[in-house]
């Protein structure tokens, strides 16, 4: 039996840093919008106990979020088995699109059922926080208003939209951005209703830093207008006055045309 499942990306429609905890973690507010740009994961049970992962050779196995997600589920497994896992990578790395977190969440969802771990969605999301603050949104598979370090989620309905996403040819270090003294860390807390009224007032606190540290991001942002997350990707909502074909054809870097998702395909996944 081979299981093949999608692993969706996300956009941060805005990202504000509202404070910093004593442990160094940053408090934030954001909106997670799922999009139909997918990695694909294939899970094939094997007779031995080995865990094999193909498709991400650039990441050490012990640091691979797919492997780490599996290790978190081992104590709960009722029918454990070995696994051959193949990753088809379409979501660019270091892009702010949540590819690694999504892969981890997909693994938690699939292996929870395959190994009959018996965990519910909330329990899986709690495990996911150990892997990264973005993992719970992909476990729940719903668009959300996010607070805390990104793990406190209020699920919201968002209008169906298209976006053009650009991926500059650079890899942004999240750690580097968070360490910058110039990072705005005291943006005033707000509410979803305020965003609904004037979304243009909401931006990304990392934008000026990303533009100054990475010329490729600055070039892309002169072409489009909004940074996503703490990665390199910039995006724009498609409106009637945009010439999509012209924008895609003349983009200064890799360009994607994507659709928003109301929910992840994994919400209804069954082995």
Image (cartoon, grey):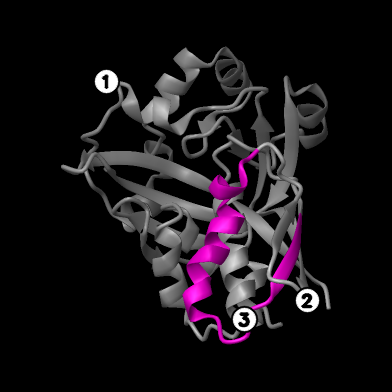
Total labels drawn:
3
Give the quarter of the figure containing the C terminus.
bottom right
Q: Quadrant of the N terminus?
A: bottom right
Disc on res. 181 = 1
215 w.r.t. 168: above or below = above
Label 1–label 2 contact, CB within 8 A: no
Disc with the residue nearer the chain's start (3 vs 1)? 3
Tell me: 228 left or right of 155: right
Which residue is located at x 59 percent, y 57 percent? 67
Image coordinates of residue 165 in percent, x first then y, are 66, 37
Compared across the picture, whether 153 is left or right of 94 comes to: left
- Alpha-carbon span between mark 1 and mark 2: 52 Å
- Pick the front one: 21 or 42: 42
Q: Earlier in the sequence, mark 2 or mark 3?
A: 2
Query: Between disc 1 and disc 2, whose residue precedes?
Result: 2
The residue where tag 3 is placed is: 115
Pointer 2 with pointer 3, Cβ within 8 A: no
Residue placed under numbered mark 2 in the picture = 47
222 part of magenta stretch:
no
Range of magenta residues: 59-86
For the point 56% across and 52% down, the residue is 65
Badge 3: residue crowd in 10 Å (few <14, some 14–19, many ≥20): some
Q: Which mark is residue 34?
A: none
Dot 1 lies on which element? loop
What x and y, as percent, mark residue 233? Answer: 59, 33
In front of the other: label 2 or label 3? 2
CA separation in Å, label 2 and label 3: 14 Å
Residue at x-position 30% and y-position 39%: 17
Name the foreground residue: 66 vs 230.
66
Relative to 161, is 126 above or below? below
State which quadrant residue 263 falls in: bottom right
The answer, for residue 151, to whether it is visible in the render is yes
């Amino acid at each position: 039996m081979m299981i093949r499942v999608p692993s969706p990306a996300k956009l941060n429609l805005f990202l504000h840093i509202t404070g910093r905890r004593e442990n160094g973690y940053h408090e934030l507010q954001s909106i997670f919008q799922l999009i139909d740009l997918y990695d694909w994961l294939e899970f094939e049970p094997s007779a031995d106990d080995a865990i094999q992962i193909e498709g991400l050779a650039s990441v050490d196995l012990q640091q691979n979020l797919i492997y780490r997600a599996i290790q978190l589920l081992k104590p709960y497994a009722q029918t454990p088995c070995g696994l051959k896992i193949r990753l088809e990578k379409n979501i660019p790395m270091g892009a702010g699109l949540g590819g690694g977190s999504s892969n981890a969440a997909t693994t938690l969802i699939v292996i929870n059922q395959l190994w009959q771990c018996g965990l519910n969605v909330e329990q899986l999301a709690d495990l996911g926080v150990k892997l990264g603050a973005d993992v719970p949104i992909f476990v729940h598979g719903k668009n959300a208003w996010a607070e805390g370090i990104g793990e406190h989620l209020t699920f919201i309905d968002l209008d169906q939209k298209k976006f053009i996403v650009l991926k500059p040819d650079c890899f942004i270090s999240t750690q580097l951005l968070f360490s910058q003294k110039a990072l705005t860390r005291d943006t005033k807390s707000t509410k979803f209703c305020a965003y609904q009224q004037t979304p243009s007032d909401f931006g990304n606190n990392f934008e000026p830093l990303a533009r100054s540290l990475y010329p490729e991001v600055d070039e892309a942002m002169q072409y489009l207008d909004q940074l996503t997350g703490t990665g390199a990707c910039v995006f724009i909502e498609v409106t009637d006055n945009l010439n999509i074909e012209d924008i895609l054809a003349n983009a200064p870097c890799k360009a994607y045309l994507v659709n928003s998702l109301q929910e992840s395909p994994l919400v209804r996944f069954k082995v």
